[in-house]
Image: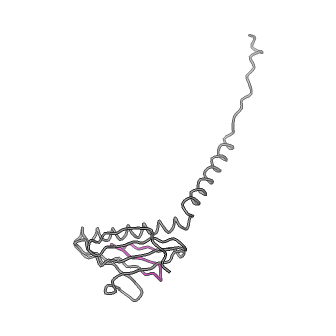
Amino acid sequence: MPREARRAAPQRGMTLLEILLVMALIGATGVLAAGVLTGGFDRMELRSTAREVAAQLRFARTRAIATGTTQRFTIDPAARAWQGAEGNAGEIGRSLDVQFTGAREVQPDEGVGAIVFFPDGASTGGRIQLRMRDAAWNIDVAWLTGEVSLRRGEVQR
């Protein structure tokens, strides 16, 4: 075959810009779908805040056992702030409601709740409920064992 007869076929394909645009659209759709399927971004904030508070309670218990010294976790529902072991502190988003139930004897101030962990793992016990509209998470601390559990809760009105 002569050289002129072997013409190269025009190349077909997508440009880099087109590929990046499609990837961006897929990513945006995935983020929106994740938000809808998991109950929305507000519920994601509720769940992550509940997990963070539960983790800090577990940390306070662990520090009490490891160091042999009493550790205190305090929460101020009005200020939406907590303070844990070793100076750890955090805030709770304004979109969440906070309710604390626990021993009045260990309250540092009026309206501020506290859970005390002892070196043997026990605690004064209590419940922190975080809620938003029709969803709630309960963080329970058993007084005898100091065990911290995180469960979906009923919205208490």
Query: Horizontal placement of 2 versus 69: left or right?
Result: right
Q: Residue 24 in the image: x percent, y percent?
A: 63, 50
Which image quadrant: the N terminus?
A: top right
Q: Is residue 15 left or right of residue 92?
A: right
Colour scheme of the rendered structure: one colour
In magenta, the rendered stretch is 76-90
> Viewed as shown, does residue 32 lie left or right of 112?
right
- Please, is residue 63 above or below residue 116 in the view? above
Looking at the rendered structure, the number of numbered marks drawn on it comes to: 0
Judging depth in this view, the residue of 40 and 5 nearest the camera is 40
Tell me which corner region of the image, top left, top right, bottom left or bottom right, holds residue 59. Answer: bottom left
Percent across and percent down for residue 147 are 31, 69
Residue at coordinates 41% horizontally, 80% vertically from top-left? 100
Q: Magenta stretch containing residue 96, yes or no?
A: no
Q: Residue at x 40, y 79 (%)?
A: 75
User: Which residue is at the far right?
Assistant: 4
Q: Any magenta on residue 88?
A: yes
Q: Nearer the viewer, residue 1 or 134?
A: 134
Residue farthest toward the bottom in the current orientation of the protein: 110
Quarter assignment of residue 52? bottom left
Of all residues shown, which one is farthest toward the top?
A: 1
At horizontal 45% and vertical 71% (from top left) the residue drawn is 153
Q: Position of residue 16 (x, y in %)?
A: 66, 41
Residue drawn 37% across the image and 79% down it: 74
Q: Is residue 31 above or below residue 94?
A: above
21 or 2: nearer the viewer: 21
Against 31, residue 146 (above or below) is below
Q: Position of residue 12 (x, y in %)?
A: 71, 32
Q: Quadrant of residue 109 in the image?
A: bottom left
